[in-house]
Image (cartoon, rainbow, N blue to C red):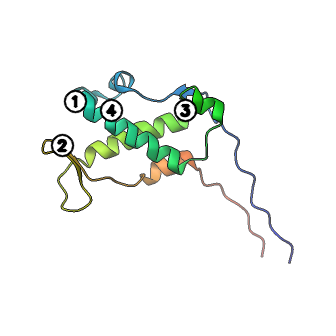
Amino acid sequence: MPDIEPPEAEPIPRGTPADWYTIDTIRSVWGTAEDIPDTLLDELLYVARESVLAFAPPLPPEMEAAGQCPVEYRMAQLMQTRNLWNAVEVDPGGVFGDDTYQIAPKPLDWIVKQMLRPRTAVPVAL
């Protein structure tokens, strides 16, 4: 039986490079962010960005050094930040934060994962 090689990874960047979201830029696209204190919003953005980077294919060093990312990564950061904010309900286990805000970390949503590593159909011959 011949060896089947996996398809080559899609080159990065996909889409037009953009900067990661910041406190100011996320508030222009997500109305709820206006009600979140700066410190907490900054932490949510950081955790979401790190989650995206942990799951997605690595960025080229020049993009990482410039603080840039593909548009898909930026959108994934926005969606994961919103997911984290929606998880700000007190949960008895796996919670971090102070008395005012507590966050139960959630894994990347399946939609966010699909944006970062799209599944493609691979024909299989039997």
Dot 1 alpha-carbon crowd within 10 angstroms: few under 14, some 14 to 19, many 20 or more:
few
Q: Relative to residue 37, is residue 8 depicted above or below?
A: below
Nearer to us of marks 4 and 3 is 4
Spatial CA span between label 1 and label 2: 10 Å
Answer yes or no: do the residues labelled 2 and 3 have beta carbons within 8 Å?
A: no
Answer yes or no: do the residues labelled 1 and 3 have beta carbons within 8 Å?
A: no
Answer yes or no: do the residues labelled 4 and 1 have beta carbons within 8 Å?
A: no
Circle 1 SS class: loop
Pointer 2: what residue?
101
The amino acid pointed to by label 3 is Val
For the residue pair 87 and 40, the one nearer the viewer reads as 40
Pointer 3: what residue?
71
Q: In which quarter of the image is residue 69?
A: top right
For marks 4 and 1, the one nearer the N-term is 1
Spatial CA span between label 2 and label 3: 30 Å
Dot 4 alpha-carbon crowd within 10 angstroms: few under 14, some 14 to 19, many 20 or more:
some
Q: Which mark is residue 37?
A: 1
